[in-house]
Image (cartoon, rainbow, N blue to C red):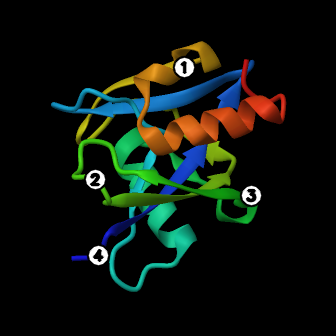
Amino acid sequence: MSNLIDKLAWLEIVDGKILVARSVGKDAFYIPGGKREPGEADDEALLREIEEELTISLLPPSLEYFGTFTAQAHGKPAGIMVQMTCYWAKYTGEIQPASEIEEIRWVNYKDKQLVSHVDRLIFDDLRNKGLLN
């Protein structure tokens, strides 16, 4: 088993707040996204995951790379890391929780303790760039 979990995330910020989601039975919120299937490119995996989780369609031409962040994986044994590759994108549809998502929230930087370790790094970066209140 690899010590690195490869994940993709979609960043959506409105009025200085970022969209986060919590899966059924989980204690932490996370930036929406997920793991790629074998052979999937970043855009394919991200579009599929976001549609499964939030019932919206990301617009492929609008995908814009933001950054890649690595940290200890939340709820996993020490040394299991997660690498999160983040993108901005426009979308169509209405955001609502679907599939395994129990709750979605719009949060500020002060809510950083609610999210996973890697997402805290992303929150810090967004705050430093003046994008997250």
Dot 2 and dot 1 residues touching (CB under 8 Å):
no
* Label 1, label 4: how far apart the Cα atoms are: 32 Å
On residue 78, the disc is: 2
Three-letter amino acid code at disc 4?
A: Ser
Residue located beneath label 4 in the image: 2
> Residue visible at 41% across and 37% down?
116
Q: Position of residue 107 (x, y in %)?
A: 55, 18
Quadrant where the image shows the N terminus: bottom left
Between marks 2 and 1 in the image, the one whose residue lies nearer the viewer: 2
Q: Earlier in the sequence, mark 2 or mark 4?
A: 4
Residue located beneath label 3 in the image: 62
Mark 4 neighbour density, 10 Å: few (under 14) some (14–19) many (20 or more): few
Residue located beneath label 1 in the image: 106
Three-letter amino acid code at disc 3?
A: Ser
Between marks 3 and 1 in the image, the one whose residue lies nearer the viewer: 1
Between marks 3 and 2 in the image, the one whose residue lies nearer the viewer: 2
> Residue visible at 69% across and 50% down?
88
Asked whether the viewer can see residue 47, the reply is no
> Residue visible at 15% across and 31% down?
25
Q: Earlier in the sequence, mark 1 or mark 4?
A: 4
Q: Earlier in the sequence, mark 4 or mark 3?
A: 4
Q: Position of residue 65 (x, y in %)?
A: 72, 61
* Label 2, label 4: how far apart the Cα atoms are: 13 Å
